[in-house]
C-alpha cells in the first residue's frame, strides 16, 4: 500500500470514528505486505478489533443500565447442590433463544435455592449478547411506579420497564403489595406481553397463592398469570437453601473442631 493511500485511509477511518481500526492501520499494512494477505483478509483484520471494542463498550453500558445488585454468571452456579435442577434446560436457556421467542422464565422455590443467581446470570448473558436488561425487585418496581404515578410521569417510568429486551423481576411474593401496587405490576406484565418481550421472574409463591401477590385480587392474579404463562418456561427448584446448608456445615465444623471440656477434679 502506498504511503499516500495509507494516509488517506487513516484520515477516512478517523473521520468515520473508527479509532481502533485507525490505530492498528500501520501494523496491518506491514503484516499484509509481509504475508501477502488478500484484500478481504486485510479488511477483516483491520475491522475485527473495532467490532470487538464496540461490543465490549455496548456490554459495559448494558450492565450499567441493568442495575444488577451483583454480577452472577452461569458457570458459577453450583448445580451439584441442586441435583433436581435440569442443567440441560439451563444450558438451552443460555443460548438466548427464549429472548427472540419472547418467552418468559419463572423460577419458583423457597428462599436460598439459587433463583436470583440464575435470573441475574441469564440477565448478564442477555447483556453480553448486546441487549438491554433491567433488574428490579417486585416491591421496588411497585414503589417506583407508584411514585411515578403520583408525580404524573407513569408513562415515562413504564417505558423503562417495557423497552429492554429482558425485564428481571426478583422476589415476587416476598412482600405484600397494596391494591395500587398490584395493579401497576399487572400493567407492566401486560405491556411486556403485548410487545412480546421476555420477563425473567423469581418467586417463593406457588401460582395458586398469587392472589396474595396482587393484594387479594384473585381475578387480577389470574389475568397476570394468563399472560405470564402463555409463552413461558417454569423452573421449580425444590432443593435445600444454600445459606441454611452453609450454616449447618459451619455448626458441624464447630462441633468437630471444638475441644471437649476437661473434667474438673473433685478436691
Image (cartoon, rainbow, N blue to C red):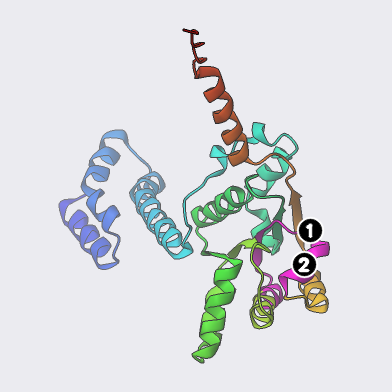
Residue 50 drawn above or below residue 29: below
Give neighbour class at mark 1: few <14, some 14-19, many 20+ (Cα, 10 Å): few
Look at 22% across and 58% down and name the residue there: 10
| Left or right of 191 in this view: 140 | left
Look at 72% across and 53% down and name the residue there: 108
Residue 44 drawn above or below residue 83: below
User: In terms of secondary structure, where does tag 1 sit?
Assistant: loop
Residue 8, located in which quarter of the rendered image? bottom left
Give neighbour class at mark 2: few <14, some 14-19, many 20+ (Cα, 10 Å): many
- Horizontal and vertical percent position of residue 247: 57, 35
Foreground pick, 20 / 153: 153
Q: Name the residue tied to disc 2.
A: 210
Q: Are marks 2 and 1 in contact (CB under 8 Å)?
A: yes
Residue 30, located in which quarter of the rendered image? top left
Separation of marks 2 and 1 at Cα, in angstroms: 7 Å
Residue lying furthest front: 267
Residue 159 visible in the snapshot:
no
Disc sitting over residue 206 in the figure = 1
Residue 150 drawn above or below residue 81: below
Look at 64% across and 80% down and name the residue there: 184
Amino acid at each position: 500500500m502506498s504511503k499516500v493511500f495509507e494516509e488517506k485511509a487513516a484520515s477516512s477511518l478517523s473521520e468515520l470514528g473508527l479509532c481502533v481500526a485507525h490505530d492498528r492501520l500501520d501494523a496491518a499494512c506491514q503484516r499484509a505486505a509481509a504475508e501477502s494477505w488478500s484484500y478481504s483478509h486485510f479488511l477483516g483484520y483491520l475491522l475485527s478489533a473495532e467490532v470487538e471494542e464496540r461490543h465490549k463498550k455496548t456490554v459495559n453500558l448494558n450492565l450499567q443500565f441493568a442495575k444488577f445488585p451483583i454480577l452472577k454468571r452461569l458457570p458459577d452456579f453450583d448445580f451439584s447442590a441442586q441435583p433436581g435442577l435440569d442443567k440441560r434446560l439451563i444450558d438451552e436457556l443460555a443460548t438466548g433463544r427464549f429472548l427472540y421467542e419472547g418467552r418468559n422464565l419463572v423460577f419458583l422455590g423457597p428462599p436460598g435455592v439459587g433463583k436470583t443467581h440464575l435470573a441475574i446470570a441469564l440477565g448478564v448473558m442477555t447483556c453480553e449478547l448486546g441487549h438491554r436488561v433491567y433488574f428490579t425487585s417486585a416491591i421496588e418496581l411497585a414503589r417506583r411506579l407508584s411514585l411515578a404515578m403520583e408525580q404524573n410521569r407513569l408513562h415515562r417510568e413504564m417505558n423503562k420497564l417495557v423497552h429492554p429486551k429482558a425485564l428481571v423481576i426478583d422476589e415476587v411474593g416476598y412482600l405484600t403489595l397494596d391494591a395500587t401496587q398490584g395493579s401497576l405490576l399487572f400493567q407492566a406484565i401486560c405491556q411486556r406481553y403485548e410487545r412480546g418481550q421476555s420477563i425473567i421472574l423469581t418467586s417463593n409463591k406457588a401460582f395458586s397463592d398469587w392472589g396474595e401477590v396482587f393484594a387479594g385480587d384473585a381475578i387480577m392474579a389470574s389475568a397476570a398469570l394468563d399472560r405470564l404463562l402463555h409463552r413461558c418456561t417454569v423452573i421449580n427448584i425444590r432443593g435445600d437453601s444454600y445459606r441454611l446448608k452453609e450454616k449447618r456445615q459451619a455448626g458441624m465444623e464447630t462441633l468437630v473442631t471444638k475441644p471437649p471440656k476437661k473434667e474438673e477434679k473433685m478436691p
